[in-house]
Amino acid sequence: MAFTHSLPPPLQLVKPSSISPKPSIFFNQSSSISSNLFNPPSTLHNPSPFSTLRTRIIVKSKAQEPEVSVASDAFTQFKHLLLPITDRKPYLSEGTKQAIATTTALAKKYGADITVVVIDEQQKESLPEHETQLSSIRWHISEGGLKDYKLLERLGDGSKPTAIIGDVADELNLDLVVISMEAIHTKHIDANLLAEFIPCPVMLLPL
């Protein structure tokens, strides 16, 4: 009598679902990961094909843990946040409102101070709705639950907004800059110059 051996169905690779965008944080300081995390595990007796796959997943997961720890630990050290505003709308764009809400939430959670810097290439006299914009900024910050913050204005000084942000961050020894991607998409801030001019971590908020 002939015996038949049924084979298990082939493994299928499942395409991961799309993940909603999350803020991107860029650090100027790199973190090192211990090399022993990448050492292969000791060989087991009669290993199955699935044990190798499972082992690789575990090693990859462990290798990412120090990076996550470094990022989360850094948040507790953010004591002074910079919120640059290059928006020219008197009642603010959605990206600016999002940046204000995120900055105030971080400040409340970690007990950090906030400095807001309003940047425009034109002089104050050429901006008829400038005071309306400042009132909008103050209102949205108060809606975030903060009353104490510093508001600076850098208007018409001839410098690029990215350079101004870097100068303020350096002068005040700031810990984090919060920027909406909207400011980059509208060409108000040059993304290529962020790493060159800004001496601290930058949080880019997706639209």
Image (cartoon, rainbow, N blue to C red):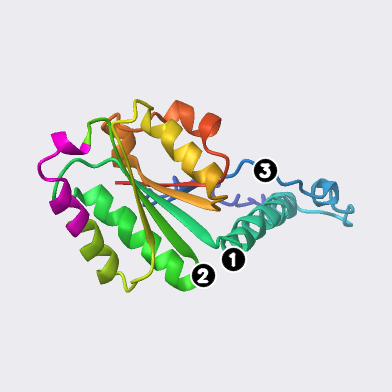
For the point 21% across and 54% down, the residue is 134
Q: Give the image location of residue 115, x and y in percent.
A: 41, 55
Q: Give the image location of residue 196, x and y in percent.
A: 54, 29
Tell me the tag on residue 29: 3
Along the horizontal axis of the image, is 173 left or right of 57? left
Do labels 2 and 1 touch, CB within 8 Å? yes
Given the image, on which type of amino acid does mark 1 rest? Thr
Residue 138, located in which quarter of the rendered image?
A: bottom left
Q: Secondary structure at mark 1?
A: loop
Please check the rendered image and state whether residue 27 is part of the magenta-colored stretch, yes or no.
Answer: no
Residue of label 1 = 76
For the point 54% across and 51% down, the residue is 174
Q: Secondary structure at mark 3?
A: loop
Please check the rendered image and state whether residue 131 is part of the magenta-colored stretch, yes or no.
Answer: yes
Residue sitting nearer the eye, 31 or 198:
198
Q: CA distance from mark 3 to mark 2?
A: 21 Å
